[in-house]
Amino acid sequence: MTNKTVTITDNVTGKSADFTIRDSVHGPSVVEIGSLYKEFGYFTYDPAFTSTASCQSKITFIDGEKGILLHRGYPIAQLAERSSFLEVVYLLIHRVLPMKESLEDFKRNISKHMLLNQGILNFFNGFHYDAHPMAMLTAVVGSLSAFYHDRIDISDAFHREQIASRIVAKMVSIAAAAFKHMMGHPIVYPDSKLSYSGNLLNMMFSMPTEPYEINPVAEKALDQLFILHADHEQNASTSTVRMAGSTGTNPFAAIAAGCAALWGPAHGGANEAVINMLDEIGSVDNIAKYVEKAKNKDDPFRLMGFGHRVYKSYDPRAVIIRKTCHDVLEALGVDDPKLELAMRLEEIALQDEYFIERNLYPNVDFYSGLIYKALNIPSSFFTVLFAIGRAPGWIAQWMEMIADPDQRIARPRQTYRGPEMRDYVEEFQRGSK
Ligand code: ACO
């Protein structure tokens, strides 16, 4: 604890009050302003929370200026290169890297929970063949709350861990079932002999009619992509999970709220937008024209997959995934003009003064979209893969929130700018302005 304070003086009334400054382990300290209203009768106004810490957390740290991303203190590059997705999930949920037996138990538990109740699979029959997979994911994840409710005690730490394993396990099976529904193909069940990412590939692409072999390059790339998406502190979907969860709602319902928030193009939908942009550019010959459009302030066109709100030097995840992307394309021998177009666009933009000056590098979505495309995954499914990767972050943050003694129902305030109080007007008297 620190004795540092900041003094705020109200120049209207002349009243002053001290507010405690609480230091962070990394990153800016925070001013505790909970008593501001009591002291001065003011609320703070910070739309989009640009200067507001909504919680204290021990899970993830980001320094956007320096391009740093840590999970439980470990740099993302070390986790992406040396760990596996399920080990990172364990780290996020259980706070420490596991011993060998603990990880094996954890994997067995995840594998066991991958099987979906037949009643859950029946939900898919109700969706039209062209339903967006994020709509199916959101609905079916939410409906898990109908299957797991009376046996859940969220105040019990053991129950919370069980819920976490179920979420991580069932996300992958629900996603694969949504994919099969889109394709009109029969459901494939999970196989306990396969890895987490191997299971996803098998459940998505294997068919009863012919043998399917999991490509180890694809399996490794997916596992790494999931690690890179595993958590990103208080982003929009995670904050949504915390907000919904703060009411004490069923945790599966809170995770469904996170899926809904992730779906938007400003969040998890950007990887899909990259592929749509490549469609629009069409051919290598048009790149110069589109780069000029992106630089023109009067043109709304932007290079999708370039730039980031938080990372202002570089996105540490993109550095890792760029290499994987190039390796995957080479290893799979992918010969797709759209991928060639993307690689050429990356090259041209990285040499352009406009992008260099503004630190506009390709972000993680630029490369993830290209990898998914190389794996023959339709672009509407990209955000579902983001959701699978982000699920452990959502659930770890939910667990942390429930166990936090400072936790209360999240209830922001507002500054009201509507009409002043006025009397009700009878219908026959309305119409005159
Ligand atoms: N193409 C062209 N110019 C760009 C781009 C881009 N993709 N991104 C930023 N710029 C320019 C801006 O016009 C601005 O130029 P100026 O200084 O001459 O006015 C400068 O770079 C700074 O840009 P801002 O808009 O202030 O950056 P901000 O942090 O607000 O936006 C954002 C970040 C939204 C990610 C933006 O870079 C963008 O729209 N990128 C494309 C969409 C995208 O890839 N989104 C995914 C982000 S990753 C994620 O959220 C999971």
Image (spheres, grey):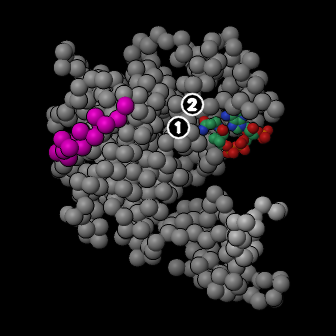
Answer above or below: position of 182 versus 52: above
Magenta region includes residue 85: no
Q: Position of residue 103 (x, y in %)?
A: 22, 49
Answer above or below: position of 162 versus 189: below
Spatial distance from mark 2 to mark 1, Cα to Cα? 7 Å
Q: Nearer the viewer, residue 430 or 218?
A: 430
Helix, strand or loop at label 2? It is helix
What amino acid type should be assigned to the residue bearing mark 1? Gly
Q: Position of residue 39 (x, y in %)?
A: 67, 87
Quadrant position of residue 245? bottom left
Q: Which residues are magenta?
A: 112-128
Mark linked to residue 273 = 2
Mark linked to residue 354 = none
Residue for badge 1: 269
**Taken as a whole, is the magenta stretch helix, strand or loop?**
helix
Helix, strand or loop at label 1? It is loop
Side of 422 where 133 appears, left or right:
left
Residues at marks 2 and 1 touching, judged by CB atoms closer than 8 Å: yes
Q: Quadrant of ligand 1?
A: top right
Residue at horizontal 43 percent and vertical 20 percent from the top? 374
